[in-house]
């Protein structure tokens, strides 16, 4: 079947090398603006944290901002902001990242800062207890005291999955957080924060040779430790539908989210990409199938969204992952009717195919979003680092818009036909009723 639309590859230059200590480095020079983005991505996320230590990956991310081998607490903040830069970090299912955007003349400052905490963060009882309290407050703000807190990314995985890595609360229970020790933190650092388990990426206004020398200067003497063996997160697909409900004491309206397993992003990238596009065909814009049917025509929902991965990161997630659809309903809305309508629309797509121009319109919009996102130096650095880490190919960044356009109507139809009720996991939010059941979540530093 002919391609629906042809979108060219981008041509961002990419240089790569590996230091003797195992640190992989990706450089993407771009002199269009005097700015650089620096990112360090460690191959450890929520799925890697040990049982009894829920929320530890996120807690440790906080600890990485509390001083380091040669710098006191808050010094990292002052050095970045004093150079006119910004910084942050975040915890994801499969990785944790730390990053800065700075004027290009502050490149060495950023490299020194990241290398210094790669040698070792300042792990003290005072820092640990302080950050446990910070994370607990973050859970209160983002989950416990917020309508739909943790919906669906915390609430849906335990319905779909059975294993601890895939199903547990990534924000963490208060009990697990409070019982964490400095020894736990030191062990976590020693195991997962090895330079052999990290990718350093720099994008923007840089000279490749000079940047390489600076990286060798600052990171070359970081202790060589190999990457740990990555745990096996695999588990079987569903063979029968799963549904659960919970009451959210703060939610004003009912809501529902459903998920279906999709192919392995690494082992079957072509099959996986069809679902990435399908999610957009179903929900992106007023002309998309589920928005048109559920929101505009039937008015059985007030909003509907679709995406890949419980954190909505289609190009930054490993298997197992899922296509997720979520909707908020009007007062008295009927979840059974909404799910039945979704099934009808999936059957119609699988039987009748796509309308003229439907796929091309979706692909053009997706490619536009990708091109816009990748235009920022920091976004480019972050995405290349994760692609190198998970797919072994930072240069895949240049291929993504073209690969989106390579998905055919036949692949979309096949993917839609696989989204059957017997493979679906759903969680329904019941509004109000004075019950206070809520969970926990991932967050960024401030």
Image (cartoon, helix red, strand yellow):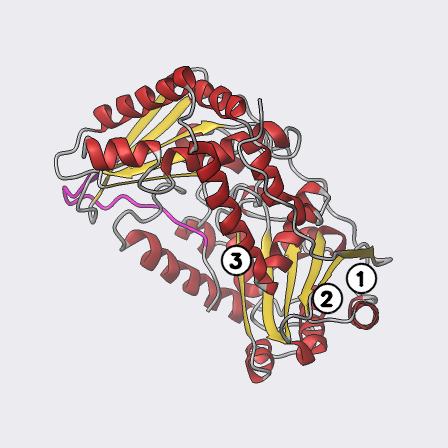
Question: Dot 2 corresponds to which residue?
Answer: 119
Q: Residues within 10 Å of mark 1 (few under 14, many from 20)?
A: some
Dot 3 or dot 1: first in sequence order is 3
> Residue 225: x and y, percent?
79, 54
Judged from the image, the secondary structure of the residue bearing numbered disc 3 is: strand
In the rendered image, which quarter is residue 190 located in? bottom right
- Between marks 2 and 3 in the image, the one whose residue lies nearer the viewer: 3
**Marks 3/1: CA–CA distance:** 24 Å
The residue carrying pointer 2 sits among few (fewer than 14), some (14 to 19) or many (20 or more) residues within 10 Å by Cα, namely: some
User: Eyeballing the image, is 177 above or below 166?
Assistant: below
- Name the residue that disc number 3 marks: 90
Structural distance between the alpha carbons of marks 2 and 1: 7 Å
Mark positioned earlier in the residue sequence (2 or 3): 3
Closer-to-camera residue (355/133): 355
Circles 2, 1 touching at the beta carbon (< 8 Å): yes
The magenta segment is 429-442
Viewer-side residue, 54 vs 400: 400
Magenta stretch: residue 430 in it? yes
Mark seen at residue 223: 1
Q: In x, y percent, where is residue 280?
A: 43, 37
- Residue at 31 percent across and 20 percent down: it is 344
Give the secondary structure at mark 1: loop
Name the quadrant containing residue 341. top left
């Amino acid at each position: 079947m002919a391609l629906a639309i042809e979108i060219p590859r981008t041509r961002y230059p990419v240089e790569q090398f590996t230091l003797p200590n195992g640190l992989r480095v990706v450089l993407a020079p771009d002199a269009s603006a005097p700015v650089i983005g620096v990112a360090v991505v460690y191959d450890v996320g929520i799925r890697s944290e040990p049982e009894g230590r829920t929320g530890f990956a996120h807690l440790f991310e906080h600890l990485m901002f509390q001083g380091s081998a040669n710098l006191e607490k808050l010094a990292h903040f002052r050095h970045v902001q004093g150079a006119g830069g910004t910084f942050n970090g975040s915890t994801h299912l499969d990785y944790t990242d730390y990053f800065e955007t700075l004027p290009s003349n502050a490149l060495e400052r950023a490299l020194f800062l990241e290398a210094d905490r790669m040698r070792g963060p300042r792990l003290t009882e005072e820092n640990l207890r302080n950050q446990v309290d910070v994370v607990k407050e973050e859970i209160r703000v983002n989950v416990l005291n917020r309508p739909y807190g943790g919906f669906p990314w915390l609430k849906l995985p335990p319905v779909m999955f059975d294993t601890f890595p895939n199903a547990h609360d990534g924000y963490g229970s208060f009990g697990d957080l409070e019982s964490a020790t400095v020894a736990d933190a030191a062990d976590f650092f020693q195991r997962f924060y090895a330079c052999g388990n990290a990718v350093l990426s720099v994008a923007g206004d840089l000279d490749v040779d000079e940047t390489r020398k600076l990286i060798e200067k600052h990171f070359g003497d970081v202790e060589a430790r190999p990457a740990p063996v990555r745990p096996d997160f695999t588990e079987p697909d569903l063979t029968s539908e799963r549904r659960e409900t919970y009451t959210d004491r703060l939610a004003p309206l009912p809501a529902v989210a459903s998920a279906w397993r999709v192919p392995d992003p690494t082992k079957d990238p072509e099959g996986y990409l069809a679902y990435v596009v399908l999610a957009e065909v179903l929900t992106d814009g007023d002309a998309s199938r589920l928005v048109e049917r559920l929101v505009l025509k039937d008015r059985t929902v007030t909003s509907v969204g679709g995406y890949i991965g419980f954190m909505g990161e289609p190009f930054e997630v490993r298997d197992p992952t899922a296509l997720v659809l979520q909707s908020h309903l009007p007062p008295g809305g009927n979840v059974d009717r909404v799910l039945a309508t979704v099934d009808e629309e999936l059957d119609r797509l699988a039987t009748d195919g796509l309308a003229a121009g439907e796929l091309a319109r979706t692909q053009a919009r997706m490619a536009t979003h990708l091109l816009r996102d990748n235009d920022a130096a920091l976004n480019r650095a972050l995405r290349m680092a994760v692609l190198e880490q998970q797919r072994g190919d930072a240069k895949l960044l240049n291929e993504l818009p073209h690969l989106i356009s390579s998905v055919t109507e036949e692949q979309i139809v096949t993917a839609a036909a696989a989204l059957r009720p017997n493979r679906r996991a759903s969680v329904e939010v019941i509004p109000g009723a004075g019950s206070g059941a809520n969970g926990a979540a991932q967050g960024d530093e401030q």
